[in-house]
Amino acid sequence: MAQLVPTDEDDLTKVDASPTKAFFVEIITKDIQLDEAIQDLVDNCIDGAKRLRPGTDADYNGLTVSINVGPNGFSIEDNCGGIPLEVARKYAFKFGRAKGFKRTSHSVGQFGVGMKRALFKMGDKFSVVSVEPEYSFRVDVDVLAWADDDVNWDFDIADLAEGPHPAETTGTKISVEALDPAVASTFSQQAFVGKLRHDIRVAQQHPMRLGLAITLNGEAIIPTAWQLKEGDGISPAYRRYEDELGGESPLVTRLYAGVGESSRAHAGWYVFCNGRCILEADQEATTGWSEVTDEGVNVPKYHGQFARFRGYAFLDSEDSSILPWNTTKTGLDLESDAYRRLQGRLIEITRPVIDFLNSLDAEKDFEDADKVLSLAITRASSVALERLAPRPAFAYTVPPKRGPALARISYQKPQAEVEKLKAELGAHSNKELGEQSFEYAFSNLVEDD
């Protein structure tokens, strides 16, 4: 048998297992929705704000993010400090988080794939323009031309210019042209734009509350309020935990639980990781509904009786790798240590609020004067979370012991007969007639026994 002799170009002992760019691009964009991809780009702007103004409760007033979507293109622009040249060269455009990368403290850009995934998903051409204090530059990418070359994975930096650049001129602008036809069609739909506006309002409500201004197609997005009822005997719970989970820094968890306005759509748990809202108004077992702790504390399955329940969970760490979120930041990692600790704590802090809401529901059959908890809810003020004092458990004033519960009786009879009986009993209204006839029957048929 003839022997095959390897050459310098063809080592017969090696099998080529390298990925193609086209396959790689398809894989990383396949399982993320378009609005989620845009949210990843907003997260990068938030990280820029965190680098510029560190701290979990920093003042973001004056910082802006402007997003524009339409059938002819996409852009997102911020004034949050720009991308440092060294970060752009070695890390920002790399697929995955490279060794040696210094994380942004309390980052929401956790996995190092969000920007590339979003841009590849939207179109065939994109540009990134950055102005940071020391340098300005741009990166232009023709995705189809880049994908044809499976050897060179680099992007080229153009228009490199040295600073210094004034702080007010720094920022990043990302633009996508040659949109995928399906993306262009989606961007032209008002329903998509409306959903994107809602999703940004939910996910980024924390940085917006700190002063960051976000606009979509020129219209400001207004953050939702975080408030719980307090006063007139009602006191929300506020607990703080600090856990060492093996990361570079501890995980700090703040839990708030209480009652708000009655709304099935807004009731439930809101969970934030480094300021990013991961779950909104969650009413599932993930946040403890229909679950039981090892100590036997239980929370029932959510139903309409609990429409006033509000819970807020804030998980923060300088080391974002220990936070219990998934890669698309649309849910919690149920296998993580941080989540397992969180769920039990959510159940424990929820239970007293459920007891209150059960008592509140029981008042439906009481006379108005006896509806003590309902009156307290009406009188209590809606208080911002940051104004609440620490309290280990939700508390409320137990109403005084009342008489027996009342039941309503309703029936119809011929008008002529009703008028005759009213005259016979001396009743002046149908209500009075009903009360007197009931008392007459009860006296003669029950008490005499």
Image (tube, helix red, strand yellow):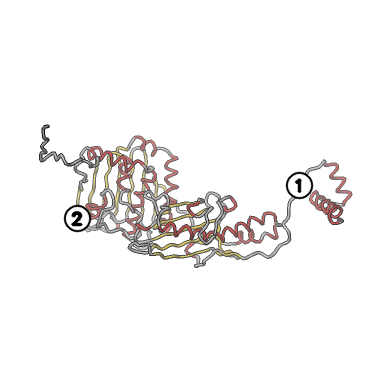
Classify residue 361 as left or right of residue 243. right
- Name the residue: 76% across, 47% down: 410
Q: Relative to residue 42, is residue 59 depicted above or below?
A: below
Q: Nearer the viewer, residue 253 or 160?
A: 253
Tell me the residue that label 2 is attached to. Answer: 162
- Name the residue: 11% across, 35% down: 3
Residue farthest along the right direction in this orientation: 424
Which numbered tag is attached to residue 443? none
Residue farthest along the front direction in this orientation: 1
* Percent position of residue 206, x then y: 42, 57
Q: How many marks on residues?
A: 2
Element on which disc 2 rests: strand
* Percent position of residue 151, x then y: 19, 42
Classify residue 203 as left or right of residue 86. right
Amino acid type, callout 1: Ser
Which numbered tag is attached to residue 410? 1
Mark 2 packing: few (<14 Cα in 10 Å), some, or many (20+)?
A: few
Location of the N terminus (image quadrant): top left
Picture quadrant where residue 188 is located = top left
